[in-house]
Image (tube, rainbow, N blue to C red):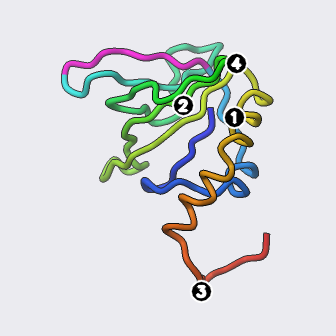
Amino acid sequence: MLQLQFCGTYLCSSLLRSRAPTFGVVLSTITPFNGCQAGIYKRAELMKLMTYPLEQVEVWKKRDDGTMLLRGEQWDEGEFSRWPQTWICGRNPSAVAAALRGMSAWLDREYAKVKQPPYANDRPR
């Protein structure tokens, strides 16, 4: 699984390619207040949650190779605010990388809509 958004904003493909995906099992449940919820759990310990879950989650898109885009809302680490979030979920890292390549131009356009020069803390990539 790879998270595509930060604070509700899609990140550009170069930033996403440098991030390590989270490996685990996607489990979804129906909750009484927030509809469906999905989380990534450790394969060896299915009770150990590895990320904050997506609430009000839905399957947004599904590819022929089984890779899915899940979208919903995710709380921040302090559980003060929640933001829109999208996850790429695939069977293996190469499937996630292939889906990311197919979305690169769209992700870069979405990122450019929000982040425009000059950047106060710009770093070379």
Q: CA distance from mark 1 to mark 3?
A: 30 Å
Number of callouts: 4
- Mark 1 — residue? 99
Q: Quadrant of the C terminus?
A: bottom right
Say whether disc 1 or disc 2 marks the residue closer to the N-terminus: 2
Say whether disc 4 or disc 1 marks the residue closer to the N-terminus: 4
- Identify the element where label 4 is drawn: loop
Q: Which residues are magenta?
A: 25-32
- In the depicted view, which residue is nearer to us: 32 or 9? 9
Q: CA distance from mark 2 to mark 4?
A: 12 Å
> For the residues carrying marks 4 and 3, which lies nearer the camera in this image?
4
Q: CA distance from mark 4 to mark 1?
A: 9 Å
Residue 118 lies, in percent from the top left, at 59, 86
**Other-residue count near label 3 (Cα within 10 Å), few / some / many at <14 / 14–19 / ≥20:** few
What's the magenta bit mostly, secondary-structure-wise?
Answer: strand
Q: Residue at x 37, y 44 (%)?
A: 75
- Mark 2 — residue? 69
Q: Are marks 4 and 1 in contact (CB under 8 Å)?
A: yes
| In the image, residue 27 lies in the stretch drawn in magenta | yes
Q: Amino acid at mark 3?
A: Pro
